[in-house]
């Protein structure tokens, strides 16, 4: 492959190419390879990732819906930025939705759902050992998305999933110092959900978001 970045094989991960491309562009944004305000040129990205323009265009739509890109008809696509106030607004929404998702998940949890959460936790331990901050950011998003899905509320999951992906930017920028505590809090949340105690699960989810907000405020 002649491109700068080598994409994973879509079929191996059972993902359409647009999702693989979106994940790679998202990683480039989170890792600082693409800077806030930088204009993205479809042809250049297609050449860099060794794909056609169509999956690039589709991936841009995905990333625009998640808040990673600002796309306008005449100006094109630009890497979005997040101000301190926008981050605070995002945390406000997380405080409203994530405790609710944890409470509902605890009331409907099944062994298969717990196994999904524990598997994510195990993979995060490996990523921490390897110092792979990009993988930790991806797994953090996967964990919170999983909790939303386990709530079995499609409206809540539909709102929560894009929010969680946008929050990945915040996690990635604090991951070097925040990650160990964050994943310890995840383990506590898993235990609460497994207990079937809705109030406890809600409280632990709220505590987790508040801790993440406090950590972010130390960076700004």
Image (cartoon, rainbow, N blue to C red):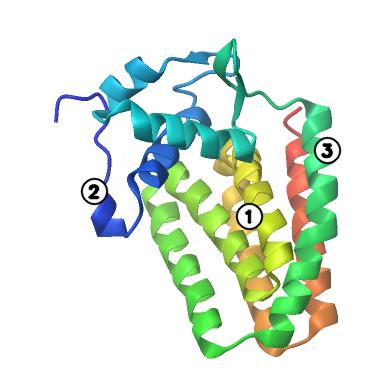
Residue 88 numbered tag: 3
Q: Name the foreground residue: 36 vs 72.
A: 72
Q: Position of residue 55 (x, y in %)?
A: 36, 35
Q: Residue at x 35, y 54 (%)?
A: 15
Residue 39, relative to residue 3: is it above or below? above
Element under disc 2: loop
| Mark pair 1, 2: CA separation | 24 Å
Inter-mark Cα distance, 1 to 3: 18 Å
Quadrant (top left, top right, bottom left, bottom right) of the C terminus: top right
Whether residue 149 sits left or right of residue 91 in the image: it is left
Looking at marks 1 and 2 on the same chain, the residue that comes earlier in the sequence is marked by 2
| Res. 192 visible in picture | no
User: Of residues 18 and 126, which is closer to you in this image?
Assistant: 18
Are the residues tagged 3 and 2 within 8 Å (C-beta)?
no
**Which element carries disc 1, helix, strand or loop?**
helix
Quarter of the rendering containing residue 100:
bottom right
| Residue placed under numbered mark 1 in the picture | 161
Side of 23 where 145 appears, left or right: right
Eye-nearest disc, 1 or 3: 1
Where's residue 174, x and y in %?
62, 39
The residue to which callout 2 is attached is: 9
Quadrant showing the N terminus: top left
Give the answer, above or below, for where 180 lies relative to 109. above
């Amino acid at each position: 492959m002649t491109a700068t970045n080598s994409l994973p094989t879509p079929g191996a991960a059972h993902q359409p190419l647009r999702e693989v491309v979106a994940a790679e562009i998202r990683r480039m944004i989170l890792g600082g390879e693409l800077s806030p305000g930088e204009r993205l040129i479809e042809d250049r990205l297609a050449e860099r990732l060794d794909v056609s323009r169509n999956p690039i265009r589709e991936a841009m739509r995905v990333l625009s819906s998640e808040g990673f890109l600002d796309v306008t008809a005449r100006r094109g696509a630009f890497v979005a930025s997040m101000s301190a106030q926008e981050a605070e607004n995002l945390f406000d929404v997380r405080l409203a939705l994530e405790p609710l998702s944890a409470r509902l998940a605890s009331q409907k949890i099944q062994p298969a759902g717990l196994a999904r959460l524990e598997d994510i936790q195990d993979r995060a331990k490996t990523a921490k050992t390897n110092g792979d901050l990009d993988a930790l950011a991806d797994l953090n998003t996967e964990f919170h998305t999983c909790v939303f899905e386990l709530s079995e509320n499609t409206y809540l999951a539909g709102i929560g999933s894009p929010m969680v992906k946008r929050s990945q930017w915040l996690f990635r920028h604090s991951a070097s110092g925040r990650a160990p505590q964050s994943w310890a809090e995840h383990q506590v949340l898993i235990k609460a959900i497994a207990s079937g105690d809705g109030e406890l699960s809600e409280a632990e989810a709220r505590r987790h978001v508040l801790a993440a907000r406090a950590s972010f405020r130390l960076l700004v």
